[in-house]
Image: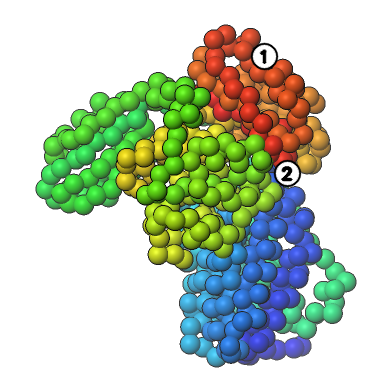
Amino acid sequence: MKQVTSVSGQDLKEMLVAATSWLEKSAPDIDALNVFPVPDGDTGTNMLLTMRSSMEETDRVPNNSAAAVAEAVAKGALMGARGNSGVILSQIWRGFATALAGKETLGSSELADALILASNRAYNGLSNPVEGTILTVIKEAAAAAQEQVKGDGSDVITVMESAVHAASEAVANTPNLLPVLRNAGVVDAGGQGLYTILEGALRYLRGEVQLMQFRKPQIIVGTASTTRLPLTVEEVPYGYCTEFLLKGDKLKPARIQKNLDKKGQSLIVVGDESTVRVHVHTLNPGEVISYVTDLGTLHQVSIRNMDEQHQNFLEMQEDRRPVADTSIIAVVSGDGLTDVFRSLGVAEIVPGGQTMNPSTKELLKAAESVPSDKVIILPNNSNIVMTASQVQALTKKQIKVVPTETIPQGVAALLAFDYEADLETNTELMENAKSAVKSIEITRAVRSAQLDGLSIKKRQAIGFLDRALVAVGNEVTDVLKKTLSKIGVDKPEVVTIYYGADVKQEEAEAVSEDIRQRYPGVQIEVVHGGQPHYEYIISVE
């Protein structure tokens, strides 16, 4: 049986080249694991593009030490990271490279240590790590490798086999850890992608490169029960946007944040021992104020009813003017939506969104291209937020990411921008504003699925409310009506309809009329968004 006690930098590079090719074969299958059957299930594609960027960077390595190759892999992954899965993968490679710093070769103990540090880096890179994801898979793989080294672990192949076996079991167990996976009947896509990369590397070590050309990676089947239970989505009232400045002696921002955490949402606590600024959305502002008055004196107190916070969309749109001090970058897909965001003062548009997540490098290039040293990025997609968060470490400019997850949230954030405020204040204002709008998205299922108690057939129309699947049907207009009925707003004030590239204007106007009949007096605007895949994106305020 073949044994390997040491891996050179060149071998490490070829291992990962083989792993990338192995991942490429299964990328479409990993994409199909997306919990929601929408045309943006691109975890496999994002991880593949991230790995390709790593491989391109290794071609520039001046020497072939293990340390140099690992550092190039980490750098390439960061610059090419796409989507949440790509960002987490880049953190894994950063931890891996840190462990190999200064090392010419990679032995079994170095491999185990590198996997442990990779796991730690991935977990530490997230403010709210979730088990049942790629994080669990790298953690279990690293633990298994470490245990193997403690036993009879001089052989790199044996250690890698232990890691891959543990990764396989961890992927199969992900539906037991995340109900959303169990309900959808799939394993975690990011975890499957990482397992595939590790398996590809192992096959290279075993000398199976030729065999890999005629085989294909297998998608792991989950061990969870096939019983599908509907998820409960709790409606959260808007409440009151409560803000104030707290001054005192020996204030403890961390303790204040902990004590206020359960008193509301969208909590921001920043400051030092003498001054703390607090922002929170709460149903009971009096309870918050009562707590902090015992700690110091209050200044600049603002309590606003968020249901009444926004003015008419059209009036505010007409008043937008560009500002030289701060530039805004937005990720947008569709000619009409591009025009909308440009008209609201966005300095640079990065093409992207569903099915087309821009890389860290593309966002960095946009940030460097704008004239301002202060930049705000609007990702407008949950799968781009983490990628955008990597930009700050790569530039001397001040970068703030307002984590908008939908187009309506991006528009709401832009409308809240204050041209006389500083960067920090505008970031807070825009983050607050994005939560005061409801987002409806209508698309068609790319595969059949069972989710949230709904039976979905391929090509059926499906409706999302604030990214939660709420309706399914054969006709787009019927699904739109069902989704509207669940918005939880008795009388919306402003509705903006962005219709997609495949929708005719008269069809959108008919939808507008139906909404007008349902909600007499509501102000409705119909805008050509031109977005692909999504027939309608609707903002409700």
Query: Relative to 455, is 370 above or below?
Result: below
Please identify the quarter of the rendering in which residue 171 is found: bottom right
372 in relation to 63, above or below: above
- Residue at image position (70%, 19%) is 509
Give the alpha-carbon distance from disc 2 to disc 1, as whole Å. 28 Å
Q: Is residue 243 visible?
A: yes
In terms of image quadrants, where is residue 338? top right
Residue located 43% across and 23% down the image: 311
Vertical placement of 303 versus 353: above or below?
Answer: above
> In the rendered picture of this protein, how many numbered marks are placed on residues?
2
Q: Quadrant of residue 289?
A: top left
Q: Mark 1 highlights which residue?
A: 513
Horizontally, residue 516 falls left or right of residue 31, namely left
What residue sits right under mark 2 in the picture? Answer: 39
Name the kind of residue labelled 1 in the image.
Glu
The one nearer the camera, 381 or 217, is: 381
Quadrant placement of the N terminus? bottom right
Q: Earlier in the sequence, mark 2 or mark 1?
A: 2
Asked whether the viewer can see residue 105, the reply is no
Please identify the residue farthest to the left as the structure is shown. 249
The spot of residue 347 in percent (x, y) is 50, 48
